[in-house]
Amino acid sequence: MRIEGSHALVTGGASGLGRTTAERLAANGARVFLVDLPGSPGAETAAEIGPDATFVAADVTRVEDVRAAVAAASADGPLRIVVNCAGVATPGKLIGRDGPLEPDALMRVVGINLGGTITVAAQAAAAIAATEPIDGERGVIVNTASIAAFEGQIGQIAYSASKAGVVGFTLPAARELAASLIRVVTVAPGLFRTPMMAGLPQNVQDSLGSKTPHPARLGDGAEYAALVEHIVENPMLNGETIRLDGAVRMEPR
């Protein structure tokens, strides 16, 4: 799939992995639509990226918001690239200090991380399927899971379950959308330098980074964006979840 000349929709695009991905896609000639919450710095981020970036305020758990965002990204050009980066990592144990895990707390995380990913993929796929193929493809959807999908730690009940759901969603989605010439691939990052991670003391960040065998540091958003770029451009990557983690395997806590 060619990046140049394509429209790309990136959720969670105001900051973190979403922002670095939007920057890379725009630098490669895509027109990028940053989807994030109304209170996010999305407009500022789009202005900093340049004239090929547009902010669209939306909540990925609201189908009407997602539908409007997809319409905006498809209005005057072909939507071909979708990157799902919106998510939360709210901690929670099955039995916490205040008792059993509340269903509302569970469903909020699952609703954003898994429900939002599927909602965006569904609405975007319908728009992409209506475009004319180029070089035998119509588009590609890249999702963000986490190594917590495989090695969830204590206190990551909702987060791990939601990200495991993203992994499980990938292959059946890819199989279904193959008829429309749309690929679906998921990236499972390890320990990355994100805004959430940046809020931790430096010694804690260094300790977490040292858990990665090689390179023994936190991942950089540019490394995630580089993989997204390769996924978009490599037509044989489909239906797969790719760990991007420096060979780290997380312990129970």
Image (tube, rainbow, N blue to C red):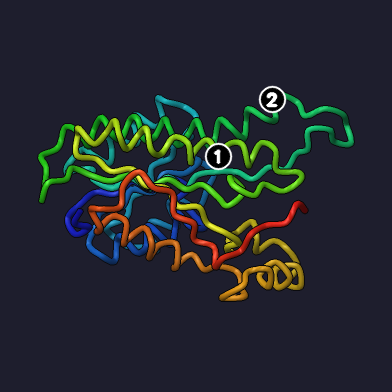
Question: Residue at image x 32%, y 61%?
Answer: 229
Pointer 1 or 2: first along the chain? 2
Amino acid beneath label 1: Ala
Q: Nearer the viewer, residue 4 or 167?
A: 167
Residue at 70% from the left image edge and 30% from the top image edge: 105
**Residue 191, percent from left and from top:** 60, 61
Residue on which the image places disc 1: 164
* SS under mark 2: helix
Packing grade of label 2 (10 A; few <14, some 14-19, many >=20) is few
Q: Quadrant of residue 72?
A: top left
Label 2: which residue? Answer: 104
Q: Residue at x 23, y 44 (%)?
A: 139
**Residue 18 relative to residue 133: left or right:** right
Spatial CA span between label 1 and label 2: 19 Å
Disc number placed over residue 129 in the picture, else none: none
How far across and down, in percent of the image, does residue 237 sit?
A: 30, 52
Q: Position of residue 92 (x, y in %)?
A: 75, 39
In the picture, measured across the screen, residue 167 lies left or right of residue 179, that is: right
Q: Is 102 situated left or right of 88 in this image?
A: right
Classify 156 as above or below 109.
below
Task: Indicate the secondary structure of the residue bearing disc 1.
Answer: helix
Residue, x 28% and y 43% (percent of image)?
A: 183
- Marks 1/2 in contact by CB < 8 Å: the verdict is no
Name which residue type carries label 2.
Answer: Asp
In x, y percent, where is residue 151? 64, 49
